[in-house]
Image (cartoon, rainbow, N blue to C red):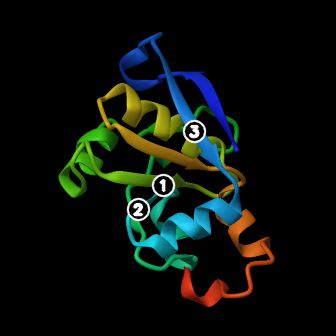
Amino acid sequence: MGALRIPSTTGGEKAKASVESVDTEAACALLASGQYGYIDVRMWEDFDAGHVAGARNVPYYLSVAPRGRPELNPHFVEQVAALHAKGDRLLVGCRQGVRSSLAAADLVHAGFKNVKNLQGGYLSLLKSANPQPTAYYNQ
């Protein structure tokens, strides 16, 4: 677990946001507590292929060109705000944890107070040795 300090990408802002990253064990505990909502920031087709049970899908990128820059979802923060209040506890995840760290930083920058990044992303959850994985995964 640790805190990331990464630049926010919303609107080209240079402000930095501090985001706590949690490992799979801590993430499973947060989800099992029922006190955290899970925001999956992968694209729809990836989400549909498998996701954390109860996850809400809000893609951070709209498309990823093979050799180009990914197209950011310009409404990402608004879409999350339509689902969650800024004081809600959120765990943000993607495939490997990179995109979710950027998304989590944007949420913190937008005023969300209780945001954590899933270190290693959805793949880390699938690979974890959690003895009860079916309680948290939906495929």
Circle number at residue 36: 2
Rendering coords of residue 25 (x, y %): 69, 65
Residue 133: quadrant of the picture? bottom right
Q: Residue at x 39, y 32 (%)?
A: 108
Q: Whole-percent x and y of residue 14?
A: 47, 10
Residue 13 screen position, x and y as percent: 41, 13
The amino acid sitting under disc 3 is Glu
Tell me which amino acid carries mark 1: Leu
Residue placed furthest toward the top:
14
| Left or right position of 17 against 11 | right
Binning the other alpha carbons within 10 Å of mark 3 as few (below 14), some (14 to 19) or many (20 upward) gives many
- Dot 2: what SS? loop
In the displayed structure, 7 sits above or below 118; it is above
Q: Which mark is residue 136?
A: none
Direction from residue 127 to residue 58 in the image, left or right: left
Vertical relation: 72 (above or below) 127: above
Q: What residue is shown with label 3? A: 20
Point out the tag, 1 or 3, that comes first from the N-terminus.
3
In terms of depth relative to the viewer, which is nearer, 127 or 24? 24
Task: Report which residue position mark 1 lands on.
Answer: 91
Q: Residue at point 51% right, 46% down?
A: 116
* x then y, percent, for residue 103: 48, 39
Category of crowding for the residue at label 1, using alpha-carbon neighbours closer than 10 angstroms: few (below 14), some (14–19), many (at least 20): many
